[in-house]
Amino acid sequence: MKTGEVKIINKGLEDEMEVWGYRPCLWKTILVGVGVVCSGGLLLLLLYWLPEWGVKGTCTHTSLRDAHTLLLRTTDEFRQWFRAKAHVMLAPWKKPFDSLDLSATAQLPNGDHSEEHYGKLAQGQPIQIHFFTHHSTKYYWDDETQNFETYKGLEDVNVSCAGIHSDHSSGLCKTLQDFRRLFFGENEIAVRVPSLFKLLIKEVLNPFYIFQLFSVILWSAEDYYYYATAIVFMSVISIATSLYTIKKQYVMLHDMVAAHSVVRVSVCKGNKEIAEAMSTELVPGDVVIIPANGMIMPCDAVLIHGTCIVNESMLTGESVPVTKTSLPSSGEDAAVSYSMEEHKRHTLFCGTHVIQTRFYTGELVKAVVVRTGFSTEKGQLVRSILYPKPTDFKLYRDAYLFLLCLVGVAGIGFIYTIVLSVMNQVPAKTIIIESLDIITITVPPALPAAMTAGIVYAQRRLKRVGIFCISPQRINMCGQLNLVCFDKTGTLTEDGLDLWGIQRAENGSFSPPESEAAEQSLVSSAFVAGMASCHSLTKIEGELSGDPLDLKMFSATGWILEEPTEEETALHNPLMPTVVRPPKHVVLEANQNNPLAQNMELSQISSFEIGIVRQFPFSSALQRMSVVVRRLGEKHMDAYLKGAPEIVASLCKQHTVPQSFTETLESYTRQGFRVIALAHRQLESKLSWHKVQSLSRDLIETNMEFLGLIIMQNKIKQETAGVLRELRQANIRTLMVTGDNMLTAISVARDCGMVRAHEQVVIADAVPPKDFNPAAIMWHYTENPQTTKDNQSVEINLEERAYDKRQPPQEQSYHFAVSGKAFAVVTEHFPQLVQKLALRATVFARMAPDQKTQLVEILQSIDYTVGMCGDGANDCGALKRAHSGISLSELEASVASPFTSTTSNISCVPNLIREGRAALITSFCVFKFMALYSIIQYLSVTLLYSILSNLGDFQFLFIDIAIILIIAFTMSLNPAWKELVWRRPPSSLISGPLLCSVLTQILTCLFFQVLVFLLVRQQRWYETWTPQSDACNVSSYSLTHSSNVSSPHDHKNIKNYENTTLFYISSFQYLSVAIIFSKGKPFRQPSYKNWPFMLSCIGLYTFLLFIMLYPVPAIDSFLEIVCVPHDWRVTLVVIVVVNTAVSFMLEILILDIILWRLVFRGNQGGNRPSASPATAKPQAANSRWGSSFLSWLFCRRNKPPRVRYMNVALELQDDPDWPPGPSTVTYASDAQSHISAAL
């Protein structure tokens, strides 16, 4: 391996990183040490902030294997740098599972390894293994791959399901446990709560606080203690608040994971003994026993014996208990390699609560430990919270650029001050202090506190409307959202389903729909027996619990579910089944017309009882579940199958499926119903109970007889349509991402207004390559329901309608609908179509959780700012990945989401966007105001430096505290505007309108300051001010005030006419720019509704006018201002009024009206709602010349849009083959995505 060669670790994963090896270099370290001493520790700070400089500055490149220090860099857009120290450990083997592959151990059956055997093996020469730890994950050096690898757990050995049963079901001996613990460490998700001292050091070493410390030291050297104390006070409060919040989050996270960190567990040892152990001692390969009364899982484990009922709300947000069955040990299913994702129905996840277990007599419920510690699902979730990705938002990047510009301005002032002072032979100490002072004036130390205030106020307002936030920086991001993805069930629609009716199939055709399944006439039918038995319901503390759909279906039958007690289970050799039966009175009523049944005995009544012998749980991959049952008294068993209608029909004998199946199913799904199909099969009588337990589901779920359809109604929440209409009017695109059926999803999208009545829906149905045929996409145009005069729905087939490509874009309105299967095919085989589909797709159905996350990433890749709203179930990944994730679930899973709403509907989304927009505009206002404050003060000080003067300490104090701090903290209080407008706020500080705004105000302030500075020197009463001067009384020069006679000489030359004049003018300038920048509509309420801000402005204006027109000697003395003639005071008032008027006119007339509307509106990214042609013509005629001229002036003619999705939209406008026509096929074989002829 070459020295200094870069390697990739975690290749293809979210946390992929580049890694370089380094070893210490003595001469570099000495050089850096000297630099640190010479710079007074500043170099050390710089190396702390930039770890790559720290490593490169003290080390030299070496191979990864020999490295002492490792330099890591993420490969994502953030390119973060980290350093890690390499360690060496001694172990008997190189890899944690090596011992299982040794021929010596293969002779021992079923992993039954003796202590003596391992003792001998371990006596050999120990091996040195290099490793390092990063973000709670250990990386070990692998000589074969010549790279660092991580060991997650049992999955690393790629073992089959049958292999887990045969090789890993007996447990581990102590030696092997200890060896594996070397690699996997203690089984705990250790959230170390840092000490307050550590947190304080980390917080204080922030560049802003270091700059504040520098400023405070400098001000103290100038005896400017008052403002220094104010800044220290503010910083202490800011640091204390930050420390409290960080510490609180650490403690909450620690408490959340501590619940299962250390528990006692029963572990099977290799010699078939059962021993008690602490959960922290568990390693992958251990076999744990799940107690009958349940437990909170301390690790990820796969079930090998028995059945468990588990509450997984911690991970999925789904509060419904899930049934977990044992891993298949025989058949095709057992030959597959074990994967936690594919076999999640057999896996017990860390942190989830096992409520109860089911077991055979004499057999314990056992599970093999698969992953421990941070490798578990819960550990990964905690890692993502402990080490989040940085918030990528243009505002923060631009803020640093803007500050760099201010530093550049400060640099000019710094040089100017030094040159001027040297020319005037000013003492060296004064030169140093005054030149450094320019820097603290230009870069305001109070900026971070002022910027944070707006976000804190927004967070408080969100809390009032029931939205809680764990990532306050993301509030600003919400202001930029232009696309929101919604989950369907529980988000757009009601959580529960109601049974609308059933439609049974008899003799190959459908019967009329029936609204009641509990009718007496149906009690003995196979259909009702299937509804009553084909589910995964269980009783927990006497209450029925399980999937809401199963609960509704079962309760509609009116049957009763009974479960065996532990005592009953112990008495029988076979597993005592769960029994379902109809109520006795229903059985008697059903048979009352039968004279033979009048004297029916209890034993005959019980013949309706059905025992559930085996369950094959619902699998989202298979889209079905099945059960094997036995009716009491029958010699044979029956199988019932329930699932997605298309899947169930494909597993049935074709002659039992009605010919009108497709049309009937489509008619229901088009109306928004959720349809489930039922099927039945009578099994061979020779099948025994034990044999059924080992059969694979593929053998059961075949040759079924179709029974009919269960039609469930999923009502749309009443707030949904209004919210989606509001978002559409605000030019925010909405998508539906659901795990439900495609046609149901399209129907809900139409009903809630996501797809409007006149718009076409194009289903992209893709198939992967098969039998030498390339992957293909079939484009189907759905039927569009149009309402006729008598309100009856008539179906119009768009496929038969003339398809006119020449329609204008607004008339040719269409949406794509994509299924999860098609999405997978398109992303893999049609990468060139992904962005095109993402631009116009509105419905994504049958999407798996990881596909939801992938979709969010695709939308972000074309520059959408994406919001995700879900109820927590299956949405965790997408909620985390989106710019703004809003969870409607208050369960612990919402810890993955930046925002959690207490209202269980989507009305929180517009509220969040409105507050986000208000917070974003507030951030811009405060930033602009603080920048102008710096520049105005910088201009005043620079002008005064030219006459070897400066502003006085109390003048600085009055400006910095009485004006700036009060205004900066009150101007952030404007509440959000009451409605969402189509326009979005700018996302960047470095944008045309904002830069023009700041520059015009700087030039205005500069002009008026220079004007009064020169004018005051032209006045006939002007002279170099001395304590004896009395310009207030120009006619009697001989008279002097006694106070003036006794005044000491002003060494700093603060008291002079130029200082007083500039102080007055600049004070009014601060107020005028504050009012100008504190904008209201359309994103915030008007400033006059912000009474603290208005009172502050009125109070300050009144005070300044009063002391200017009617001088008070005590105030003049305190502020170190001198008396000037009354005429000059009136002149200054006139200049102030003109200055304010010019500033207002430039900001409102030129920027807000002319430039914004004619030049910069195209910068918004997103299509403004089209005006009607009639209204558009005069408007276009009036503004065309202005727009053309100004666009040419600002070099914006024919400039392409900045955002990628707008570029894609422009490309598609010129593409004659897009969208594809009805019934056409796109093949993957053609790189240009050629569309074939009609089918």
Image (spheres, rainbow, N blue to C red):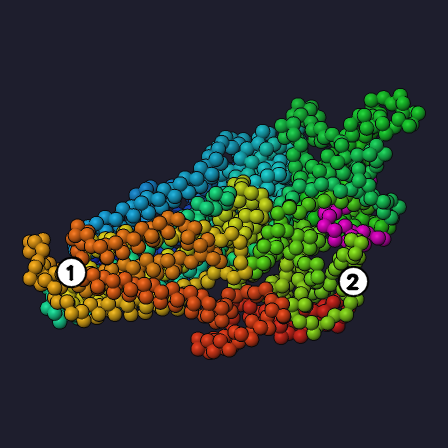
Q: Residue at x 78, y 42 (%)?
A: 501
Sequence order check, earlier mark of 2 and 1: 2
Disc 2/disc 1 C-alpha distance (Å): 91 Å
Residue 612, quarter of picture: top right
User: What amino acid does circle 2 point to?
Assistant: Asn
Q: Is residue 525 left or right of residue 830?
A: right
Residue 42, quarter of picture: bottom left
Residue 12 is situated, as x and y percent measured from the top left of the image, at: 52, 59
Sort mark 1 into few (<14), some (14-19) or many (20+) by Cα contacts within 10 Å. Answer: some
Q: Is residue 911 magenta?
A: no
Which range is magenta?
659-685
User: What amino acid does circle 1 point to?
Assistant: Cys
Q: Residue at x 59, y 70 (%)?
A: 1176
Q: Which mark is residue 797?
A: 2
Q: Is residue 682 magenta?
A: yes
Provide the secondary structure element on which disc 1 rests. helix
Q: Look at the picture and state if 1007 lies above or below 188.
A: below
Query: Is residue 339 at least partly visible in the picture?
Result: no
Q: Residue at x 55, y 33 (%)?
A: 295
Residue 783 is situated, as x and y percent measured from the top left of the image, at: 76, 60
